[in-house]
């Protein structure tokens, strides 16, 4: 376990490395997610072992805080004009998903949700090669959230 001073040093080094990785990704037109995954592997149990991923509670807390920060940033950046066309499908999906999973404690459901969330992000990172496009409403629904995050990152770098 790291002492408080070491933890602050590691956190600062990770923030600097993440910033540097995003600059490198932007410069070479690479998906930043690939560099972030490499950075995570480098600091994990198989790399420098700065973060012990056998501590599942710590990994869960880091994931929850990170997801909350991403959603908060997307909410700040999204304008109501961008959200209005996709509001009805988004509320419908959230409502149906809530009723389907209400009282459901199956481990398989949790795994399925995590896989669906991960593939949603992967769909943005790796372009589709089969030439097929999503239906317009589905594309608009996913684009609203992802574009808001991308726009807010561009504004924070430029302004």
Image: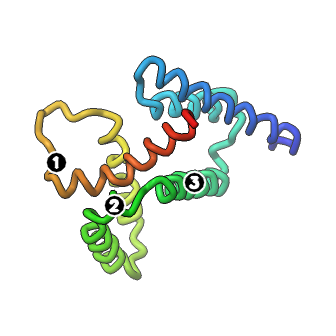
Q: Which residue is mark 2?
A: 81
Mark 3 or mark 1: which comes first in sequence?
A: 3
CA–CA distance in space, label 3 to label 1 = 28 Å
In this rendering, position of residue 124 left or right of residue 41: left
- Residue drawn 16% across the image and 52% down it: 136
> Of the residues under marks 2 and 1, which one precedes in the sequence?
2
**Residue on which disc 1 sits:** 134
Quadrant of the drawing holding the C terminus: top right
136 with respect to 28 (left or right): left
128, above or below 23, in the image: below
Which callout, 3 or 2, points at the residue further toward the start of the chain?
Answer: 3
Q: Nearer the viewer, residue 107 or 96?
A: 96
* Quadrant in which the N terminus appears: top right
**Quadrant of res 7:** top right
Query: What secondary structure is found at the residue carrying circle 3?
Result: helix
In this rendering, which labeled residue sits more in front, label 3 or label 2? 2
Residue 29 rendering spot, x and y as whole percentages = 41, 22
**Residue 158: quarter of image:** top right
Which residue is label 3 attached to? 69
Give how far apart the Cα atoms at labels 2 and 1 are: 22 Å
Name the residue: 69% across, 39% down.
51
Whether residue 137 is situated above or below residue 91 in the rendered picture: above
Q: Nearer the viewer, mark 2 or mark 1?
A: 2
- Neighbourhood count class around disc 3 (C-alpha, 10 Å): few under 14, some 14–19, many 20 upward: few
């Amino acid at each position: 376990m790291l002492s408080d001073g070491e933890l602050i040093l590691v956190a600062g080094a990770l923030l600097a490395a993440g910033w540097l990785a995003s600059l490198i990704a932007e410069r070479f037109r690479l998906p930043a997610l690939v560099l972030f995954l490499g950075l995570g592997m480098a600091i994990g149990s198989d790399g420098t072992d700065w973060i012990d991923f056998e501590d599942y509670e710590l990994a869960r807390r880091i994931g929850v805080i990170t997801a909350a920060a991403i959603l908060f940033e997307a909410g700040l950046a999204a304008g109501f004009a961008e959200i209005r066309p996709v509001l009805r499908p988004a509320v419908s999906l959230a409502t149906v998903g809530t009723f389907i999973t209400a009282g459901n404690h199956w481990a398989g459901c949790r795994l399925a949700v995590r896989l669906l969330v991960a593939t949603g992000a992967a769909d943005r990172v790796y372009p589709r090669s089969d030439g097929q496009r999503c239906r317009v409403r589905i594309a608009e629904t996913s684009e609203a959230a992802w574009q808001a995050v991308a726009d807010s990152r561009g504004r924070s770098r430029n302004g």
